[in-house]
Amino acid sequence: MLSVETLTKTYKTGDRALSDVSFTVPKGQVVGLIGPSGAGKSTLIRCINRLVEPSAGAVRLNGADITRLSNTELRRARRRIGMIFQEYALVERLTVMENVLSGRLGYVGFWRSFLRRYPAKDVQMAYRLLDRVGLSAHVDKRADALSGGQRQRVGIARALEQEPELLLIDEPTASLDPRTSRQIMRLIVEICRESGLPAIINIHDVVLAQQFTDRIIGLQAGRVVFDGTPAQLTEDVLTTIYGAEDWTAMRKGASEDAEAEEEERAQAKKLMDAL
C-alpha cells in the first residue's frame, strides 16, 4: 500500500507546488490524478519517488518511508517503483528487448548490463511481458522504428520488468490519438488488476480517467479538492477543479469516439470468428 501524508513542496523561490497532500492507495487500485496545468500533478508524482525532494511530509510504500531513506537506500527503493513517462524515455538506438531489459539495471551489476548479459530468468520475463503488451513480433526492432503507441507499450513492459510494488504513470496518453489512448489505458488497468499493482496516473484527459480508473484525485493549486469515484466527478466538481466549461459536450464527443471504437472491435471479432 502507498500512503502519502501531508506532503508539501515549496521551491526556493517561495512558490508552493504542493500543500498538505494526503491519501492512501491500496493494493490493485488505479488512481487517476487530474487538475489544470500547474496544479502540482507532475510534482506529486515525482515527490513520491523523490525525483523531486519534498519539503515536508512522508511517503510510505508498504511501511517504508521513502522520504527518510539515504541515497543508497533510495536507489534500492526505486527498484520497487515503476515509472512510465509521457515521452517514453526509451533509448532510440536499442531494440525493444534491450529497452525492456533496462528495467533490470537496478538489479544486475554494471558489467553485466554494459555487456547486455542479463540472467536467463530476466530475459524470459521480458519475453512474457512483451507478449502481454502485444509486442512479441517486434522484439528485435529498434525503438526509433516504433509508433507512439508501441513505444508506450515498451515503456509499460520496461516498468513491469522491475517487478514493482507501485506504478507511477505520467501523462501516458498525451502524445497519442484517441483510439490508441484508450487502448493504452485499458492495457495499464488490466495489468494492474491482474498483478494487484497500485498505480497513480497523472492524466489530462478527464473522460479517460472516468472511463478507466477506480478512483480520481483532483488537484487545484497544489491541494486535493476532490477524492472520490469516477461517478462522483460531477460537472460542479469539475468546475471547482478546472473552472467553467461545457462538460456535457466534452463527454458526449468522447462517448461517441468510444462507441465507434467498440463497434470496430466488435466487427473485427466477428471477422476473426468467421475465419
Image (cartoon, rainbow, N blue to C red):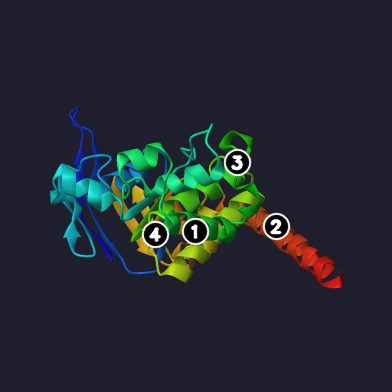
Residue at image mark 4 = 199
Q: Earlier in the sequence, mark 2 or mark 4?
A: 4
At label 1, counting other C-alpha atoms closer than 10 Å, the crowd grade (few under 14, some 14-19, many 20 or more) is few
Looking at the image, residue 65 sits to the left or right of residue 2; the answer is left
Q: Say which of marks 2 and 1 sits in front.
A: 1
Q: Amino acid at mark 4?
A: Ala
Q: Say which of marks 3 and 1 sits in front.
A: 1
Q: Position of residue 144 (x, y in %)?
A: 59, 34
Give me the C-alpha separation between circle 1 and circle 4: 24 Å
Q: Amino acid at mark 2?
A: Glu
Q: Earlier in the sequence, mark 4 or mark 3?
A: 3
Please state, as top left, top right, bottom left or bottom right, where the C terminus lies in the image. Answer: bottom right
User: Of the numbered discs in the image, which one, if any, rests on residue 124?
Assistant: 1
Q: Position of residue 161 (x, y in %)?
A: 43, 54
Q: Say which of marks 2 and 4 sits in front.
A: 4
Residue at image mark 2 = 256
